[in-house]
């Protein structure tokens, strides 16, 4: 096998959730497809330095600040690549194709309408996901359950995993309540698979009818059939390398990996720590949220360890 090519790429975020993409020239590898701007890392060059150089040369932008987003290894029939992807929020300049290539700003939600190389699919998913994933906690009061979600929406949170953790709230009742919220369409709602046995037909129909509905699987339920959720965003909870590998094999779109830090549920010897989390994240090509004993202040640590961000219950539910 030839040496893996180290490539940097940038998810450049402009105004109003627009992202810059470029079209590959027809005469190059994967020509005619869209991509995130970037290029090859030169020998002895730091990835961030390579990113700044490539964006200046390729699209005329000067990077002011950037942070890691996701790392991907991918084997094409004729090339093996390591994609080192960064997120750029601050830059100077007006984007243009410095090498004659077509560039355009697109709405984030429209990225799925463009054809990217296979290695870029996980980048698209990571781009669409936020850095925080909120998991609903336990309560006996449906009003408390709904109020917590609505308050989080008003604070700007946009990714939720909905557990059936309120006995006084059924599936259809929760769907109706969510749809009445002003910011319903701006959020991604991942329904825990445990909602399904109670209302299977209604559950499957709702998932397919709502573009911002997805399904979240526990590790033990990842081996089940996903055909009825075709096209929906799929997520799963994992705890070790074998579960991560199964998730990637089954086509799961993003993951929660735990336990990173101390919780009441796990023994000290079961904790991953940031080093263990990072080592496991490196083994797959899927956005991964850190979970377990963490707070919303741990997003920076999660990003430095190769994660998408953090998932939590207690820090927001309280």
Image (cartoon, rainbow, N blue to C red):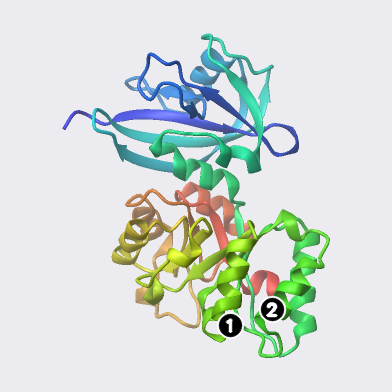
The one nearer the camera, 234 or 270, is 234
Quadrant (top left/top right/bottom left/bottom right) for the C terminus: bottom right
**10 to 103, vertically: above or below:** below
Label 2 near label 1: C-beta < 8 Å? yes
Q: Name the secondary structure under disc 2.
A: helix
On screen, residue 278 versus residue 261, left or right, reads left
The one nearer the camera, 270 or 105, is 105
Q: Position of residue 193 (x, y in %)?
A: 51, 75
Q: Is residue 257 visible?
A: no
The first of marks 1 and 2 along the sequence is 2
Quadrant (top left/top right/bottom left/bottom right) for the N terminus: top left
Q: Position of residue 172 (x, y in %)?
A: 69, 78
On screen, residue 124 versus residue 313, left or right, reads left
Distance between mark 1 and mark 2 Cα atoms: 9 Å
x 53%, y 22%: residue: 52
The one nearer the camera, 167 or 199, is 199
x 51%, y 68%: residue: 216
- In the rendered image, which quarter is residue 66 located in? top right
**172 to 247, vertically: above or below:** below
On screen, residue 27 versus residue 262, left or right, reads left
Q: Name the secondary structure under disc 1.
A: loop
Q: Position of residue 78 (x, y in %)?
A: 24, 28
Q: Position of residue 203 (x, y in %)?
A: 58, 74
| Disc on res. 172 | 2
List the residue tagged with mark 1: 199
Q: Is residue 220 visible?
A: yes
């Amino acid at each position: 096998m030839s040496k893996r090519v180290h490539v940097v790429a940038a998810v450049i975020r402009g105004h109003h959730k627009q992202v810059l993409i470029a079209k590959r020239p027809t005469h190059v590898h994967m020509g005619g497809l869209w991509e995130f701007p970037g290029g090859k890392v030169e020998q002895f060059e730091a990835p961030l330095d390579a990113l700044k150089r490539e964006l200046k040369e390729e699209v005329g932008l000067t990077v002011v600040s950037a942070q890691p987003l996701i790392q991907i290894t991918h084997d094409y029939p004729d090339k093996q690549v390591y994609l080192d992807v960064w997120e750029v929020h601050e830059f100077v300049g007006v984007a243009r194709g410095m090498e004659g290539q077509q560039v355009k700003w697109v709405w984030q939600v429209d990225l799925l309408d463009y054809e990217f190389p296979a290695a870029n699919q996980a980048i698209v998913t990571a781009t669409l996901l936020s850095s925080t994933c909120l998991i609903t906690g336990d309560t006996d009061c449906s009003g408390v359950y709904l109020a917590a979600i609505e308050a989080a929406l008003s604070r700007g949170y946009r990714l939720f995993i909905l557990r059936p953790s309120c006995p006084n709230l059924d599936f259809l009742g929760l769907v109706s309540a969510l749809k009445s919220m002003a910011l319903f369409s701006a959020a991604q709602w991942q329904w825990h698979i445990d909602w399904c046995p109670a209302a299977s037909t209604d559950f499957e129909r709702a998932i397919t009818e709502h573009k911002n509905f997805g399904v979240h699987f526990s590790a033990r339920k990842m081996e089940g059939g996903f055909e009825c959720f075709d096209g929906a965003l799929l997520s799963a909870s994992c705890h070790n390398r074998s579960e991560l590998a199964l998730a990637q094999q089954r086509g799961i779109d993003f993951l929660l990996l735990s336990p990173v830090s101390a919780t009441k549920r796990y023994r000290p010897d079961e904790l991953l720590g940031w080093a263990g989390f990072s080592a496991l994240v490196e083994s797959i090509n899927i956005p991964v949220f850190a979970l377990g004993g963490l707070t919303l202040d741990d997003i920076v640590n999660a990003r430095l360890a190769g994660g998408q961000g953090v998932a939590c219950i207690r820090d927001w539910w309280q």
